Image (cartoon, grey):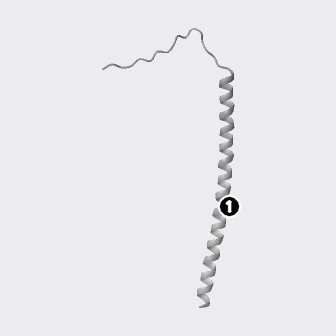
Amino acid sequence: MGAFLNILLTAILIFYAFSLIIKWIFRRKMKKLQQQMNQFQQEDTETSTKATTNPHVDPNIGEYIDFEEVE
């Protein structure tokens, strides 16, 4: 009976430690992913503001005509 309780308590302790480690790893990965997403969003914002502040339009270009295929 004593060996059974020892094994049971050891299994519970291992399960608890494993769940704490998994939570810690998950939080760390999520924080790293959030930082990467913020960095990508900042880069996207910078490139979109650069594109809108300096639009270059060539005055020699005519208007665009969309042709449809006739079968």
Percent from the top left, x then y, of residue 39?
68, 40
Which residue: 66% across, 70% down? 17
Q: Is residue 7 left or right of residue 68?
A: right
Q: Nearer the viewer, residue 69 or 21?
A: 69
The crowd level at tag 1 (other Cα within 10 Å; few <14, some 14-19, many 20+) is: few
Percent from the top left, x then y, of residue 52?
66, 24
Quadrant assignment for the N terminus: bottom right
Task: Work out which residue is located at the far left of the displayed protein and give it.
Answer: 71
Where disc 1 sits, the SS reads helix
Please tell me in which quadrant of the rendered image residue 55 appears: top right
Counting labels gives 1
Quadrant assignment for the C terminus: top left
Percent from the top left, x then y, of residue 25?
65, 59
Which residue: 67% across, 57% down? 27
Q: Is residue 66 above or below residue 11?
A: above
Which residue: 68% across, 52% down? 31
Q: Which residue is mark 1?
A: 24
Percent from the top left, x then y, of residue 8?
60, 81
Q: Nearer the viewer, residue 7 or 33?
A: 33
Task: Work out which residue is located at the far bottom of the displayed protein and give it.
Answer: 1
Q: Nearer the viewer, residue 67 or 9?
A: 67
Which residue: 60% across, 82% down? 7
Please tell me in which quadrant of the rendered image residue 14 appears: bottom right
Q: Is residue 39 above or below residue 23?
A: above
- Amino acid at circle 1: Trp
Q: Is residue 3 above or below residue 40?
A: below
